[in-house]
Image (cartoon, helix red, strand yellow):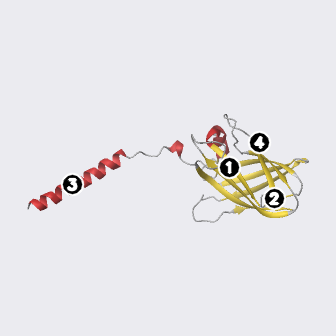
């Protein structure tokens, strides 16, 4: 009989401990959560003809869920040219559409865009905008193409609250898109 009472007491202690543990768990802070980004648009302005604007889009309306993107453009640029690029990030799951780019500007000290052309000689990307600590943000950049070629350009948004140092290493990725890139 004593064994049965001990087993019941142990079971009750485990259940009570589990409830106590659950009630003490820190809930995630919604303001720290990564934003849903359904669209990344790269808006290019040709430096030789500012009326020539090109828009390259990645649109995945369910985020990283199972459905494929509804639009996934290749970036196609002219050789030996310079383009001024602006990134626009949207959450189109909300009504009205949420312009996530505005939130990145508001929290610029926590965000960094990283550009990775492959091969590296395909295009040179220089970030133009800075945060309050004079570290790069990357919503604005200048792209310089070389000769004719094909490859990819990976664009990564790093979320780096309290650890941003101007490099890709700290933090987490909010979005990463590998755009096919053609210089022709």
Residue that label 1 marks: 89
Give the mark nearest the N terminus, 3 or 4: 3
How crowded pointer 3 is (Cα within 10 Å; few <14, some 14-19, many 20+) is rated as: few
**Front label number (2 vs 1):** 2
Q: What is the distance, in whole Å, between disc 3 and disc 1 at their CAs?
A: 51 Å
The residue drawn where x is 81% and y is 64% is 150
- In the image, 40 versus 108, the foreground residue is 108
| Image-quadrant location for residue 145 | bottom right
Residue occupying the point 59% across, 60% down: 64
Instruction: Check disc 3 and report the residue beneath it.
Output: 12
**Separation of marks 2 and 3 at Cα, in angstroms:** 65 Å
Of labels 3 and 4, the one closer to you: 4
Judging depth in this view, the residue of 155 and 86 nearest the camera is 155
Q: Which mark is residue 154?
A: none
- Residue at left offset 87%, top offset 62%: 148
Residue at the image point whose x is 15% and y is 57% from the top: 6
| First in residue order: circle 3 vs circle 1 | 3
Q: Which residue is mark 4?
A: 128
x then y, percent, for residue 7 = 17, 60
Identify the element where label 2 is drawn: loop
Q: Earlier in the sequence, mark 2 or mark 3?
A: 3
Residue with the mark numbered 2: 122
């Amino acid at each position: 009989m004593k064994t049965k009472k001990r087993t019941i007491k142990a079971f009750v202690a485990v259940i009570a401990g589990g409830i106590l543990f659950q009630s003490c768990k820190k809930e995630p802070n919604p303001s720290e959560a990564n934003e849903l980004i359904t669209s990344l648009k790269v808006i290019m302005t040709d430096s030789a003809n500012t009326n020539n604007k090109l828009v390259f889009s990645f649109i995945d309306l369910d985020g990283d869920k199972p459905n494929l993107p509804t639009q996934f453009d290749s970036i196609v640029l002219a050789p030996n040219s310079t383009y001024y690029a602006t990134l626009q990030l949207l959450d189109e799951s909300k009504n009205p559409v949420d312009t996530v780019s505005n939130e990145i500007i508001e929290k610029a000290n926590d965000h960094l865009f990283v550009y990775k052309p492959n091969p590296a000689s395909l295009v040179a990307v220089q970030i133009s905008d800075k945060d309050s600590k004079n570290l790069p943000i990357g919503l604005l950049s200048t792209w310089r193409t070389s000769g004719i070629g094909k490859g990819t350009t990976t664009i990564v948004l790093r979320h780096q609250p309290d650890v941003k140092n101007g490099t890709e290493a700290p933090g987490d990725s909010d979005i990463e898109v590998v755009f096919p890139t053609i210089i022709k």
